[in-house]
């Protein structure tokens, strides 16, 4: 895609549809994981890993990425980075599934609203990226939202902070590794695969596993591989055809849908919770405005 090609609606339509679909699926994923409430968060993650690996290997084979995938591990720094991201994404998956299946979808939503604002803070502190007044305001409002949740509601949103922190660290390390998204996720799941096999073996032999209880439960657990892989592939298509800033704006689709699912599910949402989300939404609004303001000139510039 040449610079400025995003101004052509026809050329960006497939990428925009793919990017939006990725965040749509991530936003609706609580509805799927709620169907798996018969299993523990750990068991779900173990199945998610086991069924994602063959799917990702198939994707790499079709796209001709098998050799590059193995070549990527020749660099020791990349190998160590992917080992770290493997641990981080495992923590993030567990936190999200635990939040959904324990009736804390709103906390998951809050975490993914905070995530981009936390990423901005990391970019400034570690990558020395410029920080304007709007983004300063966004970070301050997010911090006030978390503080309000602790003081007014009387609880520290540890699940939200766990999800935001783990995914922010994951995103930073993946940016440093500069590995194709499909290759990165493949190795991240492969690294966990031995633990997943051992863990499921222990669960099944001790009678705590649920895969063999019914065909429906088995199918739902196997589908966790698709739930992992499909949104990532759509995201990859979107990020290749759109500006990163456009993808950054689309990312708020997911937590918004999660918020709606949490409220519709009857989760507690008192005045204190409303104030927390209002502060976070204010921060998100400043973040969106700063992004649009920064990209306004490139968007309207003529194509050269």
Image: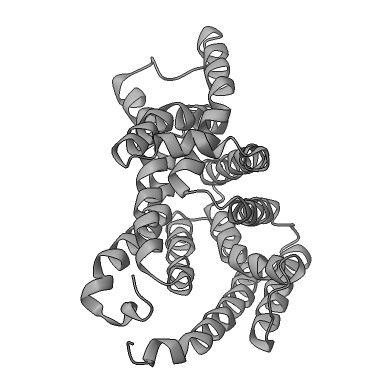
Name the residue at 39% across, 56% down. 235
Quadrant for the C terminus, please: bottom left
Name the residue at 55% across, 37% down. 188
Name the residue at 38% across, 28% down. 54
> In the rendering, at what x and y percent does residue 59 appear?
33, 38
Q: How is the image coloured?
A: one colour
Using residue 7 as the reference point, say whether residue 72 is left or right of it: right
> In the rendering, at what x and y percent does residue 196 appear?
54, 23
Q: Can you name the residue that lies furthest to the left here?
A: 10
Q: Indicate the quadrant where residue 129 lies.
A: bottom right
Name the residue nearer the viewer: 73 or 158: 73
Name the residue at 48% across, 85% down. 295
Name the residue nearer the viewer: 273 or 225: 225
Q: Is residue 268 above or below residue 82?
A: below
Q: Can you name the residue that lies furthest to the top here?
A: 205
Q: Indicate the quadrant where residue 22 lies.
A: bottom left
Q: Is residue 219 above or below residue 265?
A: above
> In the rendering, at what x and y percent does residue 109 appear?
54, 59
Q: Is residue 38 above or below residue 253?
A: above
Quadrant for the N terminus, please: bottom left
Name the residue nearer the viewer: 8 or 159: 8
Using residue 109 as the reference point, say whether residue 122 is left or right of it: right
Q: Can residue 38 be seen here?
A: no
> In the rendering, at what x and y percent does residue 97 appear?
53, 41
């Amino acid at each position: 895609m040449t610079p400025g090609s995003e101004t052509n609606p026809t050329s960006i339509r497939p990428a925009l549809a793919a990017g939006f679909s990725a965040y749509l699926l991530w936003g609706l994923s609580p509805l799927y994981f709620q169907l798996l409430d018969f299993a523990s968060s750990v068991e779900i993650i173990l199945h998610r890993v086991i069924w994602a690996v063959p799917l990702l290997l198939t994707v790499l084979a079709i796209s001709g990425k098998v050799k590059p995938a193995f070549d990527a591990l020749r660099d020791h720094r990349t190998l160590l980075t992917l080992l770290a991201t493997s641990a981080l994404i495992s923590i993030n998956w567990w936190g999200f599934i635990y939040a959904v299946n324990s009736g804390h979808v709103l906390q998951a939503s809050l975490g993914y609203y905070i995530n981009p604002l936390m990423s901005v803070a990391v970019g400034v502190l570690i990558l020395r990226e410029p920080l304007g007044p709007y983004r300063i305001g966004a970070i301050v409002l997010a911090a006030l939202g978390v503080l309000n949740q602790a003081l007014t509601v009387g609880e520290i949103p540890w699940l939200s902070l766990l999800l935001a922190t783990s995914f922010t660290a994951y995103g930073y390390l993946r940016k440093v590794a500069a590995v194709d998204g499909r290759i990165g996720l493949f190795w991240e799941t492969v690294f966990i695969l031995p633990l997943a096999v051992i863990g499921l073996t222990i669960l099944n032999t001790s009678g705590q596993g649920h895969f063999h209880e019914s065909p429906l439960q088995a199918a739902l657990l196997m589908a966790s591989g698709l739930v992992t892989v499909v949104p990532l592939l759509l995201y990859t298509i979107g990020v290749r055809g759109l500006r990163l800033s456009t993808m950054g704006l689309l990312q708020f689709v997911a937590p918004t849908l999660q918020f709606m699912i949490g409220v519709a599910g009857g989760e507690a949402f008192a005045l204190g919770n409303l104030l927390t989300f209002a502060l976070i939404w204010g921060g998100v609004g400043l973040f969106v405005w700063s992004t649009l303001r920064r990209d306004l000139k490139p968007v309207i510039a003529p194509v050269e």
